[in-house]
Amino acid sequence: MKIGHKLKKARESKRLSQQEVSDRLRISQKTLSNIESNKTQPSVLQLAALGDIYKMDILKLLSENGIYLSPPPQSL
């Protein structure tokens, strides 16, 4: 599952509307919609804020999608 879809599921599990989240992020509802539909990628700052809002580990979310902010762990 792509990042946007996981972010949408996290928002829905918190019972938040796109408008509520976009207001907190100070972005338009359309921008959040584009992020959730994987039309655009969120910035690092937006990801950090979404992690706080949704109480989720953004580094884990990224690594599950093959994105690492440091070298990936070596498999043994």
Image (spheres, rainbow, N blue to C red):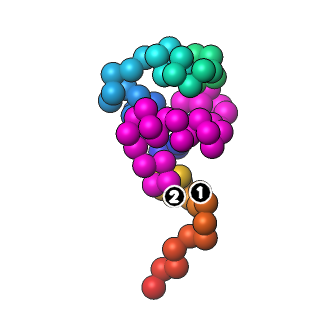
Amino acid under disc 1: Ile
Q: Position of residue 60 (x, y in %)?
A: 45, 55
Q: Is residue 60 above or below residue 30?
A: below
Q: Which quarter of the figure has residue 71? A: bottom right
Quadrant of the rendered image containing residue 66 = bottom right
Label drawn at residue 8:
none
The quarter of the picture where the C terminus appears is bottom left
Q: Residue furthest bottom?
A: 76
Residue 59's place in the image compared with 26, above or below, is below
At label 2, which amino acid type do we have? Answer: Ser
Tell me if residue 73 can be seen: yes
Q: Is residue 16 above or below residue 63?
A: above
On screen, 29 above or below 4?
above
Q: Residue 47: x, y in percent?
A: 56, 40
Query: Was residue 52 drawn as part of the magenta stretch in this picture?
Result: yes
**What kind of element bears circle 1?**
loop
User: Crowding near pointer 1: few (<14 within 10 Å), some, many (20+)?
Assistant: few
Q: Are marks 1 and 2 in contact (CB under 8 Å)?
A: yes
Q: Secondary structure at mark 2?
A: helix
Query: Closest to the observer: 1 or 23?
Result: 23
Magenta-colored segment: predominant secondary structure: helix
| Label at residue 67 | 1
The CA span between labels 1 and 2 is 5 Å
Quarter of the view holding residue 31: top right
Dot 2: few (<14), some (14–19), or many (≥20) neighbours within 10 Å?
Answer: few
What range of the chain is rendered magenta? Answer: 34-60
Q: Residue at x 54, y 41 (%)?
A: 48
Magenta segment includes 44: yes
Residue bearing mark 2: 63
Q: Is there any visible trace of residue 33 in the rendered image? A: no
Q: Position of residue 10 (x, y in %)?
A: 39, 34
